[in-house]
Amino acid sequence: MERIKILPPDDVINELILSYESGMEDASEHARFGVFMYWLNKDIDSKTLSSLFKVALLDPDEPMAGSLIKEILAHELSTAHQLSEAIEKIISSKYYYSTEEELIECFTSKVGPY
């Protein structure tokens, strides 16, 4: 299995650590979402976007993963293959809170809040 390296720089990790408060471990998806958005706001290449996409597909928090997948599909470097994979994954569970139509709209608009 390919090892995916998408950790942000130390200063971003330190900021996450400093913002931690007791009890936040029950909502770790917020930190994960923040790291994803950190990368989507950077000038990334298609390989990095592909890595982000693979990790998003594996995330156990399906509502958050669905939001991430839509953000990734709205990126200018996303591919039709990623759209197909996302549709296949999203329609397999009602907990993604996303529809095939929403994914297609994100992909075709190529404009995201990143």
Image: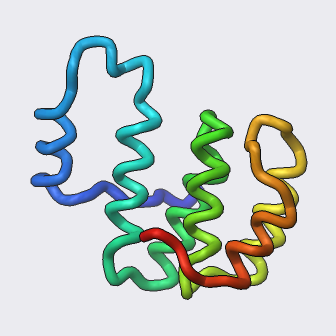
- Left or right placement of residue 47 versus residue 102 in this view: left
Residue nearest the viewer, comparing 34 with 8: 34
Question: Against 48, is 57 above or below?
Answer: above
- Left or right placement of residue 103 versus residue 92 in this view: left
Residue 53 % position (x, y) = 59, 63
User: Which residue is most to the top?
Assistant: 23
Residue 103 % position (x, y) = 76, 66
**Which residue is located at x 42 percent, y 57 percent?**
36
**Which residue is located at x 68 percent, y 73 percent?**
106
Q: How is the image coloured?
A: rainbow
Picture quadrant of residue 39:
bottom left
- Left or right placement of residue 51 versus residue 22 in this view: right
Residue 8 % position (x, y) = 26, 58
Residue 3 % position (x, y) = 47, 57
Q: Quadrant of the N terminus?
A: bottom right
**Which residue is located at x 75 percent, y 43 percent?**
97
Q: Quadrant of the C terminus?
A: bottom left
